[in-house]
Image (cartoon, rainbow, N blue to C red):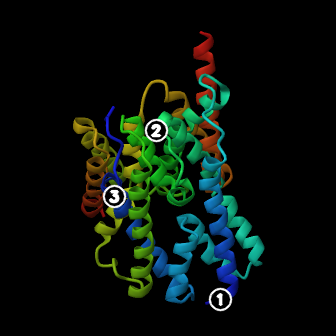
Amino acid sequence: MNDKPASFRGGLLAALPIVMGYFPIAFSFGVAATRGGLSQPEAVMLSLVIYAGASQFLALTLFASGAPILVAAFTLIAMNVRHVLYGPALMKEAGRDGARRYAWAWAWGLTDEVFGQALGAVARGQRFSESYMFGLGLAAYAAWVLGTAVGAYAGGGALDGWPAVSAGLDFMLSALFLALLLSIFSRLALPAILAAVVATVIGTLFWSGTAGILAGMICGAVAGMAAGLLRGRG
Amino acid sequence: MNPDLILMAVLAGLANWGFRALPILLMRGEAKPGGLMAGFLASTGPAAIATLFVASVLPGLWPEGRNLVPLTVGVLITVLAFLPRRSVVVATLAGSCGYGIAFALTT
């Protein structure tokens, strides 16, 4: 365990893989948005105001299809319900260091990747701090908005001549999740991980990607909880 | 700017903020150690990260299996790069480079 709480600068540095993963995805979103008929400021506005990758791509489709606004908004909202679990799980891991005075601000940046990075850091013994969360979240948010702006202004085809670079960048977030999983892996976490993997695959194959994610998180958490109870009784 | 687009974005953005911030702001102390809620929350992190990893690689495997060499190389290099120093940053960057190189060599 580190004695000093993690700093704002530490958060910025820890965000590096997220930044490198977000920028190309946001770039793709900017390109897709302008190709879909949105203006450049509208594309950037979506990234600034929604700040949720899959939701934003879906927003383009829904908006282009002429779906009623409330239906479209509700669909986007339903995609991100999983985020309600992140804050409490992070606070639980942070323990006594789990300050939340400014959570109303830094929690805006609590995306999948930021949550994973923060949780991994605390699980590895780093002390939680709100400064660290601001650094981590701000760098990721800036990369997302900036990537969108560059994509919207550059237009399509910027990476067409560099397919290997594009492929490597596409894999960045998968590699990040795998590295985070390795960093928090333990025998105690195994039931939760296995149940999550199986439920995600089944939910995705038989229903949808969103259902798979929700099923994976809930089934994994329930399996981990049940395994803990069994261990306690044994 | 289109006002309907702004309305849709604001509604979705407000909900996102609510999902991310309100559970923290509304928490009343810590979950009881050893209790059901504590167990559930402690397992949420590993479950969420495992889920997100599977969800991120699944589109490359199903419904049409693509060239699996870059994925295999990317995963292996990520794991191998992680082991010596347990650095998430190094493992992520190495895995991504490995994926890109394998992609270039096999397509």
Q: Secondary structure at mark 2?
A: helix
Task: Report how far apart the C-alphas of labels 3 and 2 lie in the structure.
Answer: 19 Å
Q: Which amino acid type is marked by label 3?
A: Leu
Residue at mark 1: chain: B
Give the x, y percent position of residue A233.
63, 11
Picture quadrant where residue A172 is located: bottom left
Q: Is residue A164 visible?
A: yes
The vertical placement of A139 against B56, above or below, is below
Is B65 placed left or right of B90 in the picture? right
The total number of labels drawn is: 3
Residue found at x 25% / y 52%:
B94
The reply, left or right, for residue A154 in relation to residue B43 is left
Residue A42 x, y percent position in the rendering: 55, 84
Q: Residue A46, position in %: x, y?
A: 56, 76
- Residue appearing at x 36%, y 63% in the figure: A19
Mark identifier at residue A12: 3
Instruction: Identify the residue at the far front of this view.
Output: A101
Q: Is residue A201 visible?
A: no
* Residue at disc 3, secondary structure: helix
What residue is pinned by disc 2? A97
What's the residue type where badge 2 is placed? Asp
Q: What is the crowding at mark 3: few (fewer than 14 residues within 10 Å), some, or many (at least 20)?
A: many
Nearer to us: label 1 or label 3 = 3
Disc 1 and disc 2: Cα gap in Å?
44 Å
Viewer-side label of 1, 2: 2
* Cα distance in 3D space between marks 1 and 3: 34 Å
Near-viewer residue (B25 or A188): B25
Residue at the image point whose x is 77% and y is 73% from the top:
A70
